[in-house]
Image (cartoon, rainbow, N blue to C red):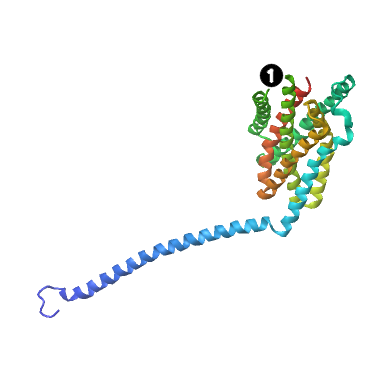
Amino acid sequence: MPGCPCFGCGMAGPRLLFVTTLVVELLGRAGGSQPALQSRGTATACRLDNKESESWGALLSGERLDTWICSLLGSLMVGLSGVFPLLVIPLEMGTMLRSEAGARRLKQLLSFALGGLLGNVFLHLLPEAWAYTCSTGPGGEGQSLQQQQQLGLWVIAGILTFLVLEKMFLDSKEEGTSQVSGYLNLLANTIDNFTHGLAVAASFLVSKKIGLLTTMAILLHEIPHEVGDFAILLRAGFDRWSAAKLQLSTALGGLLGAGFAICTQSPKGVEETVAWVLPFTSGGFLYIALVNVLP
């Protein structure tokens, strides 16, 4: 300003105006950054919601609906194979078990059941579990030592689990012991049917032809197994119709397995589940065959 004794005092006004403008602009940017962050967070949440809705939409789409229907029907057919023993075992079998002839016939059926259980373990469950772990090994070249140990530990876990369950529900009477063995066999069958449902649904996810072939292959090996299971239930004290109803109830495990396989929509997830379910079920069947049926 004119007449000011201080040098540069004439520049104070423009400088003050410049600093004020700069501060206001910075505050405006800082204030505007928070809504921007909020809008980005909202956009991210919207994208996640859209992905989730798209995944559920794909799960319930028309193409996936056919897979649902075929997988559930295939698993139900495998479960309904439990009715087949009604066509093989005589009507009076449940009431004639106390006679000498009935006891001999029951021993034959139990021997068949023993072979079916051990065959299911060593010719179906363990080889399939071995194949899964080999396919998931490093480079797909084979199993590592850790995978082999895990496979054996799951078999031991199945044996110990069924041992603990039997000791928990064991009665002092011999009839109670037989009945507990029947319920343990039903539990093992339910878990086995769960793996069958996984296999059927995973096959139908690939194609209908592979799904049908898998269902037929499971049925061919499951029908003799069901006859043996039926004999175990008869030995446990159930009549023919009660045994048939209990066998049909195990079909729920197959439906759950099929639903799980379709909902995961990932072969890797199915393989990881099967890798421990199969050896665990093998341990359960080994315990039933060698501890309950064979004696």
- Kindly state the secondary structure of the residue where label 1 is placed: loop
Q: Is residue 150 above or below residue 55?
A: above
Q: How many marks?
A: 1
How far across and how far down the image is residue 154, in percent?
66, 31
Quadrant (top left/top right/bottom left/bottom right) for the C terminus: top right
Residue at position x 19%, y 73% in the image: 12
Quadrant of the rendered structure where residue 218 is? top right
Q: Is residue 77 visible?
A: yes
Residue at position x 26%, y 70% in the image: 20
At label 1, the amino acid type is Ser
How far across and how far down the image is residue 131, in percent?
73, 38
The answer to whether residue 106 is left or right of residue 165 is right
Nearer to me, 288 or 96: 96
Q: Is residue 8 above or below residue 284?
A: below
Q: Is residue 7 above or below residue 146?
A: below
Q: Residues within 10 Å of mark 1 (few under 14, many from 20)?
A: few
The answer to whether residue 40 is left or right of residue 172 is left
The answer to whether residue 106 is left or right of residue 162 is right
Residue at position x 74%, y 19% in the image: 174
How far across and how far down the image is residue 55, in percent?
63, 56
Q: Which residue is mark 1?
A: 172
